Structure formats: C-alpha cells, structure tokens
Amino acid sequence: MDNLVADEVSEESAEEKVDPLHEVRERYKLSEEYWADDRKNALDDIKFRSGEQWPKEVADQRTKDKRPCLTVDKLNQYVRQIVNDGRQNRPAIKVSPVDGGADIATAEILAGIVKHIESRSNADAAYDTALDSSATGGFGYFTVGTEYTGEESFDQDIKIKRKRNPLSVLIDPNSTEADASDMKWAFEIEDFDKDVFEEKFPGKIPENWEALECADWYGEKVRVVRYWEVKEEERTLYLMADNTVISMARYTELKDAGVEIDLLVKDKRNIPIRKVFHSLCSGKEYLEEPVEWPGKYIPICVVWGNEIDIEGKVTHSGIIRPAKDAQRLYNYSRSAFAERAALTPKAPWLAAEGQVENYEDEWKTANTVNHSVLRYTPVSLNGQPVSPPSRINPTDVPVGFQQDMQISEHDIQGAIGMYAASLGAPSNERSGKAIMARQREGDTGTFHYHDNLNRAIRHCGRIIVDLIPKIYDSNRVVRIMGYDGTTSEASINPTIPTASQKQGLKMMYNLSVGTYDVTITSGPSYNTLRQEATESMVTMIQAHPELMNVIGDLMVKNMDWPGAEEISKRLHMVLPPPILEAEQKASMDKMPPEMQQAVEQFDAAIKQKDESINAAADEIERLRQDNQKLIVAAQKAAIDAQMAALDTQQEVIKSEQDCLAKDYKIAELNLKLQEQEAIHRVTGLAESIQI
C-alpha cells in the first residue's frame, strides 16, 4: 500500500514538473463543474432581468407571424427595493479588543482606519453591486486589495474593490461557512483580447487551457486567472504545568538541553499556520509567479442569496428565479390582451343597398377619419323610406385577460415575498406608523439578503484588521474617520512595546500588538439618523424650552445649514458646569489606563503651572502695590521738600522785610535827627541874628 501511495506521489510530482499548472487546472475544473448549474442559472436570471424573458423559439415564431411579443418589466422594482433598502441601512464595522495586549483606544483607531478605507475605496459601491448580484442571480462578490499611496512611494494602502460581473469568480466548493471564510482556493477570471494580452504580457504565450472544455477560451480571447490558495504549515504548541505555552522550537531546544520537558507538558495541540499565496496564470504558464499575500484570509468576500443544500449539492438563487414563470404568464396575458384589442374591429355601420354608393370614399374612411358630415342617398323599399345608416356595437375584449394579469402579478409578489405595500403602493393604512410597519413587514421577507451582506462585510472587516498591521508596518501618519464622517490623524509606531503609548504630547499606536475582533452594526445612515434626531430634539425643545440650555448645542450641530457648527461650539461653551465635567469624565473613562494616567499627569502639570502663574501674578501685584507706595512716598517727600523750601523762602523774605523795615526806621530816625539838627541850626542862627 505504501509503495502504491509513493508511486502516486511520484507520478503527481513528475506531472507537476511537466505542467506547473496541473494543480491549478484540477482545482479550476473541480470548481467549474461544481458551480456549473449555479452559474448557468445565474446567467439565465441576469438575462431574464435584462429583458430576455421569452423563449427564443417562441419569440422568433411570434415575430415571424407578426404577433405581439411584449415584455412588461415587473421584477426590477423588487431588486431595486432590496438594494435601496441596503443603501439606507449601511452596515458599520466595529472593532473591539479581545486579549490583554489590546486596548479600547487602539480598537477605535483600527475602526477609524477601516472607516477611512471604506470611504476612499467607495466601498458602498462594492457592497451595493454585490447585494444587487445576490438578489438577481444568487451570489455576488467584492474583494480587498492593496495599492501604493503614490507614484514614488513604497507605502501601501488597503482598498475594497467591487466585482461587477459575479461570474468572474470561482471559489472552493468545499467551503461550508456562511461567509465562505474557510475557502482553500479561489479564482478571479478576466478575459483579454489577444492583442491586449500580448501588449500587457510581452513574451508570454496566449494559449488556451486545453484541460478545460470552455468555448470562450478559444479564438481571439485569452482568459487570465488570479489564483488564490491557502497553504497550512504544521505547528505544535505545548501547554506547560505552569499554564504557559511554548512552541515546538522551544520544546525541542529544552529537550536537547537535557530538560525532562515531557514531564512538564500538560497538553499539546496542532494549530497550523495559514499562509495565502496568489499568482497570475494564463492557459500555458505563470504570468506572475506565486507570491505570499500578507494576510491569512483569501481577500474575496461572498454575498449569498437563497442557499439550498440538496444531498450535498448546494444551489443559490435570487428573487428572479422563483418569479420567472409568473412573469412569463404576465407577458403572455399582456401580449394576448394587446393582440385581442388590436384585432377587435371598431363599430361597423349598417346601411341599405345603394345608400352609400355615391359617397364610398367618405364611408371607407368612416372608422379612421373624423368626418364632420357623412352623406348618404335615401332609399325606399316598397314605397317605405329606409332608415339612415347606423352603427352596430362590436364584441368587447374578454375580462379574463385582465383577471389573468392580476393573478400573475400577485404570483410574482408571492414568489418574491414582497407585496405592493412594501413598494409604496397605497393600502388600508393611513397613519405614518402603520405605513412604516407594513413596509417593515414586507422587508422581512427579503431581510436575509441584507443579513448575508452583513456577514460578508464582517468578514471584510476581519480581512482588513488582519492586514492593517502588516501593511502599515512603518512609522507613518494615517487618516482615520469617525462614525459621523469627521476625519483626523493617528501616528503609527510599530516599535513601541504596547498597543498605545504616549510620547511627549502625542499618542503613538502599535497596531500589531493585541488581538481584535470585528462586529457589525446595521441601521440607517448617519445623515438619516441626524435628520431624525434634529426633528425629535426640536419637538422636545418646543415642549420644554428650558432644554435649550442643555441640548441646544447638539440640536444645532445636527442641522444642515451654514454656520451651524460654529453656533454649536458657542452653545457648548456656555453649557452648565456639571455637564462639561460629566463629558470630561466620560471621555476619560473611554481611555486606557496608561492614557488616563498620562492625561492626569498632564492635568496636574497644567494645574501646577497655573498655580505658579497665579503665585507669580500675586507677587507681581504685591510688588506693584509696594512700588506704588514708594512712588506715593517719594511724591510726598518731594512735596514736603517743596513746602519746606517755600517756608524757607518765606522766612528769608520776612527777614529781608524786617531788615528793610529796620533800615527804613533808622533812615527815618536819621532824617528826623537831621531835621531837628537843621531846626536847631536855623534857630541858633536866628537867635544870633537877633542878638
């Protein structure tokens, strides 16, 4: 038996040397054969939706017989309803920490990066296209890839890409998960014109895959496939007595060192390492050799429609397939009705022989031309005048055609699970709540399409979160986006030992530390929620005006008019202190302990600085007051000195005045003495004369 197995292995190895694409061909053939019915039916559904609703032989015969062959579209409205419901209820990818190495702050950064990747990739178009394909043919796809950020940059970004043609993907038929995340291989197909192929891949042979009997591989078309495969490397982990886990390499190292390691092992298990490789192949050779993909998942996301497993054979369908017969019956009834109406004669005229002979041209066009007057020749029979020509009522179109069309339309709605009320048609409901309840009830019949899309988006989130630390593996600043569409930046540093760490005043994040899980939340878009929130808050404030001081900033923020953001910020500045303190505490609670400690230290430093500033301000005020006192004292001293100088001047003036008064008195006395002496002399002279 062993020799037989060895011979088979050697034969396979020899065949692979001759044909390196042997395994690729075998897997492609297996996938194509397994999904052949699914793909054929899906293609027929797509063509049926596009208008090819009559069997070719029936349509050709009716065209040959010049009979009406009408196609009245009744199905596209239901597909659009499903897709547009998805557009109004966008799923959001949420990231949450799982192990001790992860933290909430880094999880929010990862969620912001994922949101920004979705935005710049136009991921909504990828999701809508996949949902449209699943609702039509039963399956749709979108992929995750990478691209360089610039022409001269080696940094890469992650991008979500849509698959417009759902038949361009083949996946592993052994996949059993609802989101196909366990697929081991997959193919992305692209057809090139031969000239384009030779220009794009010079030196390569545009040869067909002879192992596959597929007509569209021949002629001037060359099919190229992107082949994805998962390879698993064996890995054994050991659980030690102290509940630590060691690898096989460490186990071997300790055993070789003489440690009786087997006595310390509690348990062991094999956990293979998943590695994904991809290559580009033509029908003859590799156009791009296999290279390893950075992630551990094949980056193809599948959106299924209706899934049925019949004895191991899985088939998928959308809403078109079960409604085909009812749509055909409607087309038949509508065409038969139009044919019968066209062939029904107009009301004929009854006239006696000879009454219209002179005016035949007028009467021949009586049913096609609006004549103001129809002339006739009076005729008598046995002397009695015959009455003028008169109309005869024709036979009506049977009402059974209309009833059959109504039954067919109802059958279409029953096959799909959506009725007129779900599409907005008037019904017995009159209140807004009743109408919305009826529409939600109709949406329930097709909700599994949206649920399958959510599964695919959740798997897309896992792929992106797994890729982010491997693509953003250098010091760089990345853009992140919040749920409300606001953007900011985060600094990535793969060298720090923890998931997040403060360096100076900036937070740094190591996205490769810790394990994170992905969940999905689905609901109305942010703009829809914002409008509903605004209406509710306006109603609340109208009923309770005092709430304007509490929620006024939030109400204005949700409004969509110029200046709303600035007004909201001003209203937020005058909120009551308890609300501002609660907001600050809530924001602190969301931070990891390390960041909270850093913020507390920063706040303490700010507080200490404020205290120092206040103390310096107080000292400056004291010095200013002391200086003012000195200035006042100096001014008083100067005034006192001036007053003293004035007093001195006054004393000098008084002294001088006293001296002048004394001199005046002395002069006056001297004058009086002189006068007396003069009088004595005169008197003596007179006496002498008399004597």
Image (tube, grey):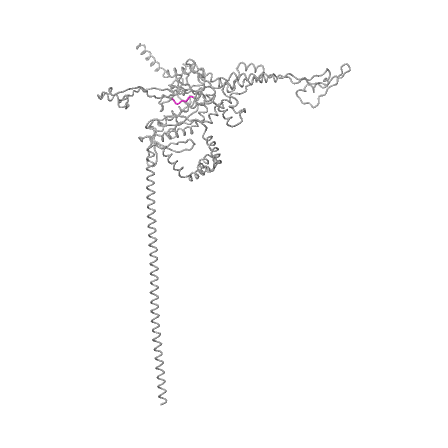
Query: Which quarter of the figure is the C terminus placed in?
Result: bottom left
Out of 552 and 130, give the one closest to the viewer: 552
> Residue 545: where, in percent of width, then height?
47, 37
Residue 674: which quarter of the image? bottom left
Q: Is residue 345 above or below residue 685?
A: above
Residue span colored magenta: 298-302
Residue 406 colored in magenta in the image: no
Out of 153 and 656, give the one closest to the viewer: 656
Instruction: Locate residue 243 relative to residue 363 in the image: left or right.
Output: left
> Residue 216: where, in percent of width, then height?
45, 17
Residue 299 colored in magenta in the image: yes
> Residue 596: where, in percent of width, then height?
34, 34
Picture mark count: 0
> Residue 252: where, in percent of width, then height?
25, 21
Instruction: Locate residue 384 relative to residue 229 in the image: left or right.
Output: right
Q: Main secondary structure of the magenta part?
A: strand
Instruction: Locate residue 486 relative to residue 334 in the image: left or right.
Output: left
Out of 80 and 95, give the one closest to the viewer: 95
- In this view, which residue lies farthest toward the bottom? 691
- In this view, which residue lies farthest toward the right? 383
Residue 15: which quarter of the image? top left
- In this view, which residue lies farthest toward the left? 258
Q: Is residue 636 above or below residue 274?
A: below
Query: Which quarter of the figure is the N terminus placed in?
Result: top left
Instruction: Locate residue 262 relative to residue 664 in the image: left or right.
Output: left
Q: Residue at x 69, y 24 (%)?
A: 372
